Image (cartoon, grey):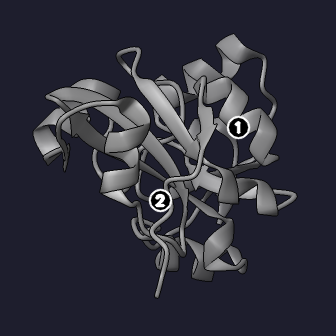
Amino acid sequence: MTTSHADAHPQFAEALRELGLDVEVRRFPDETRTAQQAAEAIGCAVSEIVKSLVFAADGEPVLVLMDGSSRVDVEAVRAELGVAAVTRADAKVVRETTGYAIGGVPPFGHRTRTRVLADRGLLDHEVVWAAAGNPHSVFALDPRSLIAHAGGRLVDVRERTA
């Protein structure tokens, strides 16, 4: 494992510089593409991982920030946005919208300005970990700061288990 802004995707490293954020970026030899892989590499709970998921809301991209142990309730996202339909964005839309590939999408530092919904469950942790623009690198930040830098709106869009 190494630690440096150089270990982040160049686009994300630039976003960190522009925001004046001095965060530790950790790079692992194995991929941290899934929340489970990231948690195992870091040594934290899966719920402390932030998933940055892109959906299409009536065809417009929207980013949902969700803890790694939960699933997004697509109907709750639809209701929150007041749109007719919400679907998962495909890999091409994710890359066009964010500038990153699935499995490495950070919560901010994207190519385009996108609406961001952040599930309130992220606030259950003192620190959360998110992708730093590639499937090998992560960074930690307190959830309120992370959501603020992402321009996220706090919502309840976690799928509830019966």
Give the amino acid type for the residue marked by disc 1 in the picture. Leu
Q: Position of residue 94 (x, y in %)?
A: 24, 38
In the image, taking residue 92 as reference, residue 99 lies left or right, namely: right
Task: Look at 82% across and 46% down and name the residue there.
Answer: 142
Residue 148 or residue 162, whichever sits in front? 162
Residue 146 numbered mark, or none: 1
Answer few, some or many: residues within 10 Å of disc 1's Cα (few below 14, many 20 plus, some between 14 and 19): many
Residue 95: percent from left, percent from top: 23, 34
Residue at the extreme bottom of the image, as rendered: 162
> Is 46 placed above or below 6 here?
below
Residue 89 percent coordinates (x, y): 18, 44
Report how far apart the C-alphas of labels 1 and 2 lie in the structure: 19 Å
Judging from the image, what secondary structure is the residue with disc 2 in?
A: loop
Q: Secondary structure at mark 1?
A: helix
Residue that carries the numbered disc 2 in the rendered image: 136
Residue at 58 percent of width and 20 percent of height? 15
Res. 78 image quadrant: top left
Residue at horizontal 41%, vertical 70%? 34
Q: Judge from the rendering whether residue 152 lies leftward or rightward of residue 72; answer left or right.
A: right
Q: Amino acid at mark 2?
A: His
Q: Would you place residue 12 above or below residue 49 in this image?
A: above
Which numbered dot is residue 41?
none
